[in-house]
Image (spheres, rainbow, N blue to C red):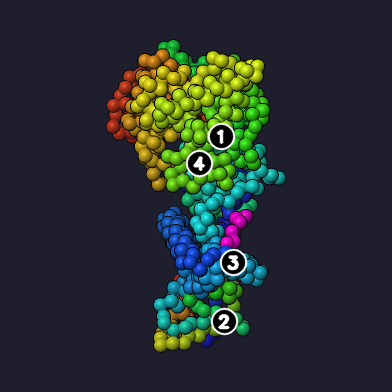
Amino acid sequence: MTEKIETVVNGIAASPGIAMGNAMVLSSRDMLVPLRRLEPAQLDDEIDRLMRAIDLSKSQLRETRQMVAKDMGESYARIFDAHVMILEDKRSLDQVLARIREGYNAEFAFNAVFSKHEKTLWEKGDVYIKDRAGDIRDVRKRVLSNLSGTRREAEELSNLDSDVIVIADDLSPADTARMRSERVLAFATDVGGRTSHTAIMARSLEIPATVGLKSVVSQVEDGDFVIVDGNRGRVVVTPSKDTLARYTLEVERYARVTKGLLRFKDLPAVTIDDRSIMLSANIESHEEVDSVIEHGAEGIGLYRTEFIYIGREGLPGEDEQHRIYKAVATRVAPHPVIIRTMDLGGDKFLSPFESPKEMNPYLGWRGIRFGLARKDIMKTQLRAILRASASGNVKIMYPMISGLDEVISANEILKETKEELGREGQAFDDACEIGIMVETPAAVMIAEELAEHVDFFSIGSNDLIQYALAADRGNEKVAYLYEPLHPAVLRFIKRTIDVGKKSGIWVGLCGEMASDVICAFVLLGLGIDELSVSPYVVPAIKEMVRSVYFKDAEAIAEQAVKGTDPARTKRMVTQSMGKKAPDMPL
Amino acid sequence: MITNLLGMHLRAAAELVKTASRFESEIRLSRDDIVVDAKSIMALLGLEGAQGVEVTVSADGKDEEDALRAVIGLIEAKFNEDE
């Protein structure tokens, strides 16, 4: 259905930068279709399950249709009417139902009938007809993935032999992890928001990305030339000569601006009136350490270790982990590295096989809850981290704390681990600082008690915001509610910082919020001691800090906390930062 | 009944199904020795109705005459496509 004319698809800017190249469309092409034999008593339920998946597919298609009608016009939208019609084709559906009644599961029955149609059309050889086979395939895959709820493995990403731009309906963090390849120039996905983990990973890998495009997969074919504009949140498919020329110029200009910010690389993050904060970087892989140093961060404020666990077979052993942590600690010394114990769960699972089917994974078995339940996995990691603490400035941080008991139990495991290492004569830093992520409203409210058991707090703003505002950050329909400058969020943050000061422990913030110069200015004013951001953002935040007065930030933060309208707060902060705020490419 | 098709692409097939489904009669399209149900989009897609191909439309039922007129009318109107 792709006409080779320029098509612009708008979405959400997830990771800055611009890249152009040939598209690789990832879809469920390698989806395995399970075969199960069913008892007669199960057949009615199985038919219901199929009908639900078909209804869901139809409503998704209708939604796309509305969108396409608005953006591209009625004649394109009619394609989706036809796709719905394919799912209403009585003869085919009857054939599927007949297969189910023979005792086959819905996936198998549906796939058998629809693949046969596809194959028949494909074999006719005519270009027209082949395209129709593609239409049936799109519909078939949609139903299959709705039936199984599983996502296809993006195995292809790990062994590419040419540069590509990945276009996908959705990429899990595990998929993105496989993009750790110089071959992937950029990616664009139909779903996702700015702070989904996939977007965060793209930023940390410094790959331009646009997400929340809704229908990019259906508009791009393998090999199409595409531009991913991660600054504006846009994808241009088969661009015209003019567009291409304009973007080529822009790529050059963007590189110059980014480079210009690096002039503060070796200077501290200190305001004109001498308030200094620690400016560190978040990483998800030891491979990013060079980028941390190149961008002038003072250490690592958040090392997300879960990516050591996902996208592999089996668990990582103690020695393997130790080698990794030690390499990171040594490389950033004398600056600190805060190693967060694995935060599995949420949207990051060990493997598809171990992922519990949870209705609401963000409120489920994750973070420290997982760690305390799987003491074996937790202990192996603590041993590896502690051993690495002998080689640098290592701090340990527990994720997802919602109660005092969790901190006490985790500290007991840590104590046991230290005793074991001591008995074995292994070297470690006994004074290694312990901290927690403050990312649940519960932790904010019991911060006084928690502070007695730790050396620092690090506010995990991504989760804190979504828990405070009850808005899923990965759901583009409610993403507008996800507002860092919401007064409830600012008051939670202020409370955490105030408690930290009273208790004599330092307080940092390691979420995406700190990457926004406006929010970072407010956080500075609230008295934050440390900000940890993606490496590439460090220069921009440093430039902001170095060009403002702390007393101005304090006054503005006080007003922002009282504000009731996030949009107005944002305008107020922006105006008061005035011309001092550098012209950021963000 | 013979007429020319302007390529049976997806949207055209969808229009044809929509029109045919308004009638009770069985409506069939045939080309050479292939005969397909005009109310089934999957069947129509398999008809290889590329531009210029000749097909025969037949209808059988209470409203067969109206059905035939409507389907042929749609084909002659080039499926209400813009191009």
In primary-sequence order, the first of circles 3 and 1 is: 3
Give the spatial CA distance, label 3 vs label 2: 23 Å
Residue A242: where, in percent of width, then height? 56, 46
Q: Nearer the viewer, residue A290 or A254?
A: A290
Residue at the extreme top: A274
B50 relative to A443, above or below: below
Give the spatial CA distance, label 2 vs label 1: 58 Å
Indicate whether residue A35 is drawn in magenta.
yes
Q: Quadrant of residue A487?
A: top left
In the rendered structure, which amino acid carries the disc numbered 3? Ala
Q: Nearer the viewer, residue A145 or A277?
A: A145
Q: Is residue A341 visible?
A: yes
Label 1 resides on the chain identified as A
User: Badge 4: few (under 14), some or many (20 or more) residues near its Cα, within 10 Å?
Assistant: some
Q: Are marks 3 and 2 in contact (CB under 8 Å)?
A: no
A244 relative to B50, above or below: above
Residue identifier under label 4:
A347
In the rendered structure, which amino acid carries the disc numbered 4? Asp
Numbered tag placed on residue A306 in the rendering: 1
Q: What secondary structure prevails in the magenta region?
A: loop
Residue identifier under label 3:
A112
Residue identifier under label 2:
B35
Mark 2 on the same chain as mark 1: no
Give the spatial CA distance, label 4 vs label 3: 32 Å
Q: Is residue A509 left or right of residue A499?
A: right
Label 2 resides on the chain identified as B
Q: Residue at x 53, y 81 (%)?
A: B29
Q: Quadrant of residue A187?
A: top right
Residue A374: where, in percent of width, then height? 54, 34
Numbered tag placed on residue A291 in the rendering: none
Q: Are marks 2 and 1 in contact (CB under 8 Å)?
A: no
Magenta region, residue range: A29-36
